[in-house]
Image (spheres, rainbow, N blue to C red):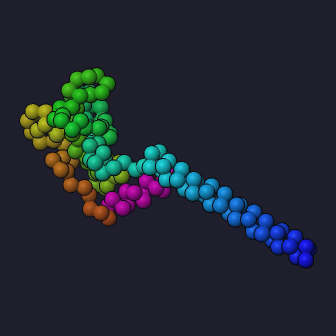
Amino acid sequence: MQSATNVLNRTTANQDRKKIILTIVGVVVAIGVLLFSVLRGLVWAPISPNEDSRRVTAVDAVSGEVFAGYRLDMQESYPWRNTKTGERTLYPAELCYWTKDGKAKSEPTAVLLNDLVGKPGKTFCHDCGRQVVGRNPMPPPELMVEAYKARAGKK
């Protein structure tokens, strides 16, 4: 009778040990998932649409320097303050995706419109020579696809 009790006690002890191990594993997994979620939200979080809409390509009217991803202040109107000089010489750029030979390119040329800085006349892209206007239209999608494929082939 006593050996049956010992076997029963050992079986119960093994089951208790398994429960403890499973509980510990479950807690470790739960902590890991929690840490991953927190780190993903803090470190690897994508830029919010609100933040992304406040980033523009700007051109310095004096130096011609291009500031890609310039972060706008909510209350500020152009000309914006150049972070390097402190002067208010930055204006929104229009992007030109054309090449001189009439093809599209994947990396645009930033162009400052004459209208914005008070210069008379039409604005032309210094890279391709085409006229650039406000809300400058992009090349047709099939030309843009070719441009992106060509760029991918160069890498």
Residue 142 locus on image (x, y percent): 32, 65
The correct choice, above or below, for 65 with respect to 94 in the image is above
Which quadrant is the N terminus positioned in? bottom right
**Identity of the residue drawn at 81% across and 71% down:** 11
Hey, which quadrant is residue 149 in on the image? Answer: bottom left
Determine if the magenta segment contains residue 26: no
Report whether residue 111 is seen.
Answer: no
Q: Position of residue 35 (x, y in %)?
A: 54, 50
Q: Nearer the viewer, residue 41 or 62?
A: 41
Who's the residue at 70% across and 61% down the image?
Answer: 20
Residue 150 covered by magenta stretch = yes
Residue shown at 37% from the left, 61% from the top? 146
In percent of width and height, residue 89 lies at 21, 28
Q: Is residue 8 visible?
A: yes
Image vertical order of residue 20 relative to residue 110, above or below: below
Left or right for 8, reference 45: right
Q: Residue at x 28, y 48 (%)?
A: 50
The segment highlighted magenta reads 143-155
Please tell me whether residue 119 is drawn above or below residue 16 in the rendered image.
above
Q: Position of residue 124 (x, y in %)?
A: 19, 43
In this rendering, would 33 be left or right of 115?
A: right
Q: Is 26 situated left or right of 112 in this image?
A: right
Front-most of residues 129 and 61: 61
Observer-nearest of 56 and 64 = 56
Between 6 and 128, which is closer to the camera in this rendering? 6
Principal secondary structure, stretch drawn in magenta: helix
